[in-house]
Image (tube, rainbow, N blue to C red):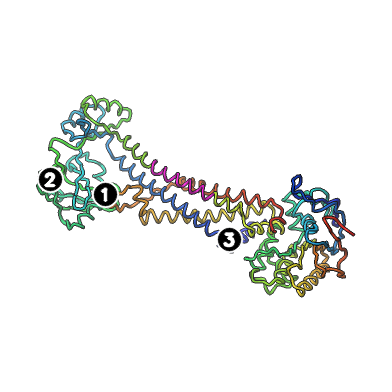
């Protein structure tokens, strides 16, 4: 059988029988689209969060009092600096600020702009802005979500924070952070560390927590013990713990979608199998005619498998393209909220493509093998029947 | 030469629904002859035709075509035999209604490994022989019964088949088209084809070009 003649006939059949294949094509496209969306969002978020985590310090130390975390004395910095293998010990100041009119909370982060080893991530955010003027007066840099709220309540140049003493502290808006930082900085307000302490009611000699690095992986277990020996009333959070928490979160959410995907796929394959098992008389007749005019069982199976493969492959490609557009161009409305959670500030997050060929290939196999099997078995069963029986 | 020796066909063998459709059938058909298998519905003539066409297998016995027993051919060989040596004309035409006349005829040539150019040439020849050239691009669905039959004839002729098997070919045709069909059979015989027609239509009685009529009743040949 010459391949070009065979394919001519195959495409002719496909175009003539398009109404027969349209339902399978649409459902297949939808399944591939949904699972691809989940994979694209998940891998994009994971990459973004892991890259953010990579720039985080190895240890976070919080002072505990009666089981609650309280502000940490900055005098501990000197204590921790004495431990061998420890570098970049710094204070961090951050906290939630509740804005009652909009019923939302902002995250205030205080940074020490004179500190060489300030958080790399914040440095990254600030490097894109001219900060020479930043310290001339009480100023802040705000995330996109914060800006929207401020605009809504007409705080276009400055915002009035209320301190714990019910005093008004006016802080001018210096700049807005670009949208591409929305994933990590949507609800963020960045300001000078001392100003942040004043608004968050943190004493000058205290901080929210203390961070430090231990460049040698093997030393981390020992350093943890040393940290506890220095101050027993602490909670120590390691970067690995945060990473594990994120992995658990993604595995949990991704797992739910994977289970849903498997259920949908199995159902679809069963429907497909059923459709071909209870193949209607016209399909049966088609096979019978082909046998009568000299087509072998092998040729008929080749025809049906190729026909199904083309439908499946086109559905797969279309599903992937639609998912790409939905996630990376339209920013996955609805689905992004499931992954990010319904945050207190509306987050117009932009997903950055992080697609691995191996993942696409795995999805392709995952989809195509059961898809083809569901067709192959019933078609083979009919093809081995007497042609006379099939044509009746 | 076609030789049928002690042919038996039993459906649902060794079950409660066991039914013997053909019983010890033995006869011979000379090359280039026209043979009518005559019998009422359910007599077994269509079953015999399908065994002759290697579309189904007998329970026992031999079907020798040019000294080759086609009764036990594996599928790959049986399909190759059908593609090269046989042409079928069915009662209900058995055409792809969504395809054109030309495409329906082409699909019988695909298994033979011809190029598209060769297929096109053979299709042109077959549609001219069957007198359906004027409808070659028409979708089969839009054809009349007679035109569909001519399309089926063209398909049976496209592979230059040595044997033409016709199963109740006039059952869906009116009298005029049945006469036209018989004229086509006459022409085919002149082209040195071996023609076997399974029918119960009396129009085939006493035709001058028919060499033999075999009457079948309850799966057996009766004189």
The kind of secondary structure the magenta stretch mainly shows is: helix
Residue A211 at x, y = what percent? 23, 35
Disc 2 versus disc 3: nearer the observer: 2
* Residue B193 image-quadrant placement: bottom right
Bounds of the magenta segment: A251-269
Q: Does B98 appear above or below A270?
A: below
Is residue A33 shown left or right of residue A92? Answer: right
Residue A115 placement (x, y as % from top left): 18, 40
Q: Give above or below for B160 relative to A243.
A: below
Residue to which mark 1 is pinned: A344
Q: Nearer the viewer, residue A214 or A208?
A: A208
Q: Which residue is mark 3?
A: A14
Whether residue A252 appears in magenta in the rendering, the answer is yes
- Quarter containing the C terminus of chain A: bottom right
Q: Which mark is residue A163?
A: 2
Q: Nearer the viewer, residue B125 or B166?
A: B166
The tag earlier along the polypeptide, 3 or 1, is 3
Q: Earlier in the sequence, mark 2 or mark 3?
A: 3
The picture places residue B37, in percent across and down from the top left corner, at: 83, 61
Q: Residue at x 70, y 67 (%)?
A: B123
Q: Is residue B170 above or below residue A165?
A: below
> The numbered mark 1 sits on a residue in which chain?
A
Screen quadrant of the N terminus of chain A: bottom right
What is the chain letter for disc 2?
A
Q: Is residue A126 visible?
A: no
What is the C-alpha distance between the residues marked 2 and 3?
71 Å
Q: Do badges 2 and 1 share one subunit?
A: yes
């Amino acid at each position: 059988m010459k391949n070009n003649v065979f394919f001519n006939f195959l495409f002719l059949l496909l175009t003539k029988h398009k109404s027969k294949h349209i339902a399978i094509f649409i459902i297949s496209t939808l399944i591939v689209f949904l699972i691809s969306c989940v994979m694209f969002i998940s891998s994009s978020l994971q990459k973004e969060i892991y890259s953010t985590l990579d720039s985080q310090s190895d240890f976070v130390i919080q002072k505990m009092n009666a089981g609650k975390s309280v502000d940490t004395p900055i005098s501990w910095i000197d204590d921790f600096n004495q431990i061998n293998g420890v570098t970049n010990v710094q204070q961090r100041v951050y906290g939630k600020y509740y804005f009652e009119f909009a019923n939302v909370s902002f995250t205030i982060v205080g940074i020490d702009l004179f500190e060489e080893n300030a958080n790399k991530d914040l440095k990254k955010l600030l490097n894109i802005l001219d900060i020479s003027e930043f310290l001339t007066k009480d100023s802040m840099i705000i995330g996109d979500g914060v800006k929207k709220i401020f605009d809504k309540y007409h705080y276009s140049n400055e915002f009035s924070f209320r301190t714990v003493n019910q005093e008004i502290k006016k802080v001018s808006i210096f700049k807005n952070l670009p949208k591409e930082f929305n994933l990590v900085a949507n609800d963020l307000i960045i300001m000078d560390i001392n100003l942040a302490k004043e608004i968050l009611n943190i004493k000058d000699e205290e901080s929210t927590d203390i961070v430090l690095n231990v460049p040698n992986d093997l030393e981390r277990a020992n350093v943890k013990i040393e940290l506890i020996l220095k101050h027993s009333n602490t909670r120590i959070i390691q970067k690995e713990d945060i990473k594990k928490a994120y992995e658990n979160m993604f595995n949990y959410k991704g797992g739910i979608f994977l289970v849903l995907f498997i259920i949908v796929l199995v159902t679809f394959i069963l429907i497909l199998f059923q459709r071909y098992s209870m193949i209607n008389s016209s399909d049966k007749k088609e096979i019978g005619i082909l046998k009568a005019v000299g087509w072998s069982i092998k040729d008929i199976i080749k025809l049906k498998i190729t026909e199904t493969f083309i439908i499946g492959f086109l559905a797969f490609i279309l599903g992937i393209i639609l998912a790409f557009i939905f996630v990376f161009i339209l920013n996955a409305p609805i689905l992004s909220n499931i992954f990010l959670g319904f945050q207190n500030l509306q987050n117009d997050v932009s997903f950055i493509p992080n697609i691995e060929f191996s993942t696409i290939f795995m999805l392709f196999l995952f989809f195509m093998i059961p898809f083809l099997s569901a067709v192959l078995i019933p078609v083979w069963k009919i093809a081995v029947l007497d042609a006379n029986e099939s044509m009746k | 030469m076609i030789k049928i020796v002690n042919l038996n066909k039993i459906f649902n063998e060794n079950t409660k629904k066991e039914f013997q459709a053909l019983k010890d059938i033995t006869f011979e058909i000379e090359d280039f002859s026209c043979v009518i298998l005559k019998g009422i519905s359910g007599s077994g003539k269509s079953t015999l035709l399908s065994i002759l066409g290697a579309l189904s297998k007998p329970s026992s016995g031999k079907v020798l075509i040019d000294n080759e027993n086609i009764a036990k051919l594996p599928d790959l060989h049986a399909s190759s035999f059908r593609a090269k040596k046989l042409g079928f004309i069915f009662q209900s035409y058995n055409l792809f209604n969504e395809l054109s006349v030309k495409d329906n005829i082409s699909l019988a040539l695909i298994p033979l490994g011809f190029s598209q150019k060769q297929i096109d040439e053979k299709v042109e020849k077959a549609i001219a022989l069957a007198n359906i050239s004027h409808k070659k691009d028409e979708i089969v669905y839009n054809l009349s019964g007679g035109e569909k039959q001519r399309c089926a004839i063209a398909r049976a002729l496209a592979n230059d088949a040595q044997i033409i098997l016709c199963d109740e070919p006039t059952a869906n045709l009116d009298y005029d088209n049945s006469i036209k069909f018989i004229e086509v059979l006459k022409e085919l015989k002149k082209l040195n084809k071996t023609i076997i027609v399974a029918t119960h239509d009396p129009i085939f009685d006493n035709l001058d070009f028919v060499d033999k009529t075999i009457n079948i009743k309850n799966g057996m040949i009766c004189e």
